[in-house]
């Protein structure tokens, strides 16, 4: 029999429906793979008992002819999503013992459709990071290695555990969140597909908040089709989330294979950065050629405020983080470190509970919101955000259907290589992705090639609001031309 963990989601769905294997057999194959791959540190909590229970329920539903669209599909869940009765920590010491009594909307919809939870996946603490090195559970290791080297590489962040697990066949798909690139950048670093939907398309209820006006949940998968299948279950209106949009959820899978002939694809001149590698520049041109060959029209466009996006993002996001993380005070839930009085207890709890990167961002955020600096920083950053959004609106008003850009400025780098002395060096990894969050748009990262050392590289497609279908159609064109990428299993 074929190794069950190498099947795509679409193929696995077919195999389960035809009873070629059971959901329990399928789940057991993944649980066995997870046991052999603990060196990757992708999972922070494995839930085999729950997985087998859900798999048996899926088998029963399939036997009755009542299977949901994800019946028996084993998934990993980023440790930012609240899972009822299952520890949820945001990979922070301050939430070390927290077991939520409720389920996030996104995960509840996955279970409604019959999916199986294999466990909780590692991420940067409170989703703050671009390399998955800030987790209280230690860094995640990328399943890819440079040719001729056994140096450990980062999988990207913040959803590094999700990306690593999908790329290493430790789950069939995974949930992620994207605040400034935290789905698309790790997907590019690990050679898989990741989509950040339009802001409001997936509910944020039950997801540990980082920056509420930027956070958005989305899926990781090995193929564009698989991502489309997962997205349909994850999306939808939720009255518990006031930013959730009440629009019908399309059949995203139906967009796969749809003609892209006559579509106008924008190439933004501002994304041609000094120092960008020749390989990424060449891959970008190659991606444009693939879309042109499929019948799309390529046009140069301008997004003039792009150069202000990164500094504006690193004002807005920490400001919202400092506000959201004020609730972690040692009083109601989470860790508590005692002190001589309540003020000292607050200080001790937060000093010991939060890691260095989270503390850094809280301090930045508190500073830019403080009296005397609010207008100079936060208010100005929000004005820049409005201008960035208008840039995209102007381009789409010219009949452009989507925008093609690189996903990252480089391939995956080594653990400990960046950001140790200068945090800004790490922040620059988000240069191609933050504009999408600032404008609330959908963006997909699709693997498109490899660098000179054999590491995967991705291209990003940015779409109109709530037009993820076009991104799936275009993404599949890139995928068909580039092929799929699989790392050698050095960890087994």
Image: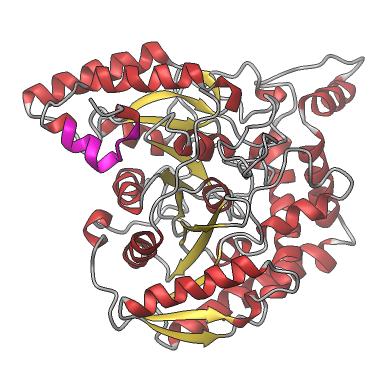
Can residue 116 be seen here?
A: yes
Q: Position of residue 139 (x, y in %)?
A: 68, 31
Looking at this view, name the residue that lies furthest to the front. Answer: 148
Give the colouring mode of the picture. secondary structure
Where, quadrant-wise, is the N terminus in this rendering? top left
The residue shown at (21%, 58%) is 254
- 458, above or below 241, in the image: below
- Quadrant of the rendered image containing residue 249: bottom left
Report the front residue among 132 and 469: 132
- Find out whether residue 7 is within the magenta segment: yes
Viewed as shown, does residue 228 lie left or right of 341?
left
Q: Position of residue 457 (x, y in %)?
A: 55, 56
Q: Which secondary structure is most common in the magenta stretch?
A: helix
Q: Position of residue 259 (x, y in %)?
A: 24, 72
- Quadrant of the rendered image containing residue 27: top left
- 380, above or below 292, in the image: above
The residue shown at (79%, 47%) is 418
Report the front residue among 238 and 474: 474
| Range shown magenta | 6-15
Looking at this view, name the residue that lies furthest to the left. Answer: 64
């Amino acid at each position: 029999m074929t190794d069950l963990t190498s099947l795509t989601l679409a193929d696995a769905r077919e195999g389960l429906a035809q009873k070629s294997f059971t959901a329990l057999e399928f789940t057991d194959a993944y649980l066995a793979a997870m046991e052999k791959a603990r060196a990757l540190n992708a999972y922070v909590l494995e839930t085999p008992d729950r997985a087998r229970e859900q798999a048996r329920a899926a088998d029963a539903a399939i036997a009755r002819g009542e299977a949901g669209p994800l019946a028996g599909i084993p998934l990993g869940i980023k440790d930012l999503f609240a899972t009822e009765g299952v520890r949820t920590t945001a990979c922070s010491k301050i939430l070390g013992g927290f077991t939520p009594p409720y389920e996030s909307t996104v995960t509840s919809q996955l279970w409604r459709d019959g999916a199986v939870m294999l466990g909780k996946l590692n991420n940067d603490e409170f989703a703050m990071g671009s390399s998955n090195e800030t987790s209280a559970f230690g860094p995640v290791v990328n399943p890819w290695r440079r040719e001729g080297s056994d140096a450990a590489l980062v999988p990207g962040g913040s959803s590094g555990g999700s990306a690593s697990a999908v790329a290493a066949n430790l789950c069939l798909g995974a949930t992620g969140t994207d605040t400034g690139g935290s789905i698309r950048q790790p997907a590019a670093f690990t050679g898989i597909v990741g989509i950040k939907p339009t802001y409001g398309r997936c509910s944020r209820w039950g997801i540990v908040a980082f920056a509420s006006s930027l956070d958005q949940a989305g899926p990781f998968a090995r193929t564009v089709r698989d991502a489309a299948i997962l997205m349909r279950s994850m999306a939808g209106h939720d009255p518990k989330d006031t930013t959730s949009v009440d629009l019908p959820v399309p059949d995203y899978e139906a967009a796969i294979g749809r003609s892209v002939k006559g579509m106008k694809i924008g190439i933004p001149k501002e994304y041609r950065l000094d120092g960008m590698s020749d390989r990424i520049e060449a891959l970008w041109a190659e991606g444009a050629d693939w879309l042109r060959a499929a019948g799309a029209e390529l046009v140069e466009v301008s997004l003039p405020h792009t150069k202000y996006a990164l500094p504006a993002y690193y004002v807005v996001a920490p400001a919202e983080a400092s506000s959201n993380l004020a609730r972690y005070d040692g009083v109601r839930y989470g860790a508590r470190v005692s002190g001589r009085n309540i003020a000292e207890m607050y200080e001790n709890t937060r000093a010991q509970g939060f890691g260095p990167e989270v503390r850094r961002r809280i301090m930045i955020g508190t500073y830019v919101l403080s009296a005397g600096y609010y207008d100079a920083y936060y208010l100005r950053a929000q004005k820049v955000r409005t201008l960035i959004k208008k840039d995209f609106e102007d381009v789409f008003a010219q009949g452009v259907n989507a925008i093609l850009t690189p996903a990252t400025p480089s391939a995956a780098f080594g653990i400990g290589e960046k950001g140790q002395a200068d945090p800004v060096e790490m922040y620059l990894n988000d240069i191609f992705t933050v504009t999408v969050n600032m404008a609330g748009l959908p963006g997909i990262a699709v693997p498109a090639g490899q660098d000179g050392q054999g590491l995967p590289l991705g291209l990003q497609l940015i779409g109109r609001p709530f037009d993820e279908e076009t991104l799936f159609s275009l993404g599949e064109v890139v995928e068909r031309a580039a092929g799929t990428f699989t790392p050698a299993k050095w960890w087994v």
